[in-house]
Image (cartoon, rainbow, N blue to C red):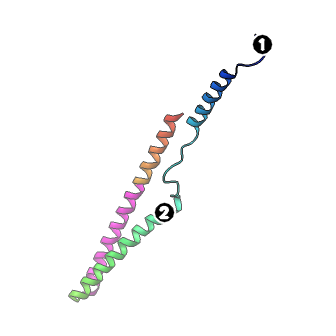
Amino acid sequence: MSGEPDPMRLKALEEKLAAAKKARAPKPRADEHYSAASQGWRMVIELVAGLAIGFGIGYGLDWLFGTMPVFLVLFLLLGFAAGVKTMLRTAQEIQATNVAEQSAGDEGE
């Protein structure tokens, strides 16, 4: 037995270490470009779009029938409700994604 280490065993050990490091390295997320700010803006735009569509429909119906504030107010409220509902659905989608990522991260440990 000489004092020299076996090169084949060292190479095998290096390969095992590289594989272990690769397995423990954080995986890049496909939707990394979505920040909290962009998600917030998405929700604001959904609310404003609901209000704008409600305003457009209400104003158009009021202009058509000559009943100025009635349909405008009604469809503004309906547009607001639709916008809030869409925002809540988006928030649930984001939360479900975060929970899935968290549980996937916990399983890897």
Secondary structure at badge 2 equals: helix
Q: Is residue 74 above or below residue 82?
A: below
Viewport quadrant of the N terminus: top right
| Residue type at the position of mark 2 | Gly
Magenta region, residue range: 67-91
Q: Taking 53 as reference, is 23 left or right?
A: right
Res. 107 mark: none
Residue at horizontal 32 percent and vertical 66 percent from the top: 82
Q: Is residue 65 above or below residue 12?
A: below
Residue toward you, 19 or 64: 19
- Pointer 1: what residue? 2
* Residue lying at the far left of the rendered structure: 65
Q: Is residue 101 above or below residue 38?
A: above
In the rendered image, residue 78 lying in the magenta stretch gets the answer yes
Q: Specify the quadrant of the image occupied by residue 73.
A: bottom left
Q: Taking 62 as reference, is 3 left or right?
A: right
Residue at horizontal 58 percent and vertical 39 percent from the top: 25
Residue at horizontal 49 percent and vertical 51 percent from the top: 30
**Residue 81 locus on image (x, y percent):** 33, 67
In the rendered image, residue 102 lying in the magenta stretch gets the answer no
Label 1 neighbour load within 10 Å: few <14, some 14-19, many 20+: few
Residue at horizontal 68 percent and vertical 24 percent from the top: 10
Secondary structure at badge 1 equals: loop
**Residue 6 locus on image (x, y percent):** 70, 19
Q: Specify the quadrant of the image occupied by residue 58.
A: bottom left
> What secondary structure prevails in the magenta region?
helix
- Pointer 2: what residue? 40
**Residue 74 locus on image (x, y percent):** 28, 76
Viewport quadrant of the C terminus: top right
Spatial distance from mark 2 to mark 1, Cα to Cα? 66 Å
| Residue type at the position of mark 1 | Ser
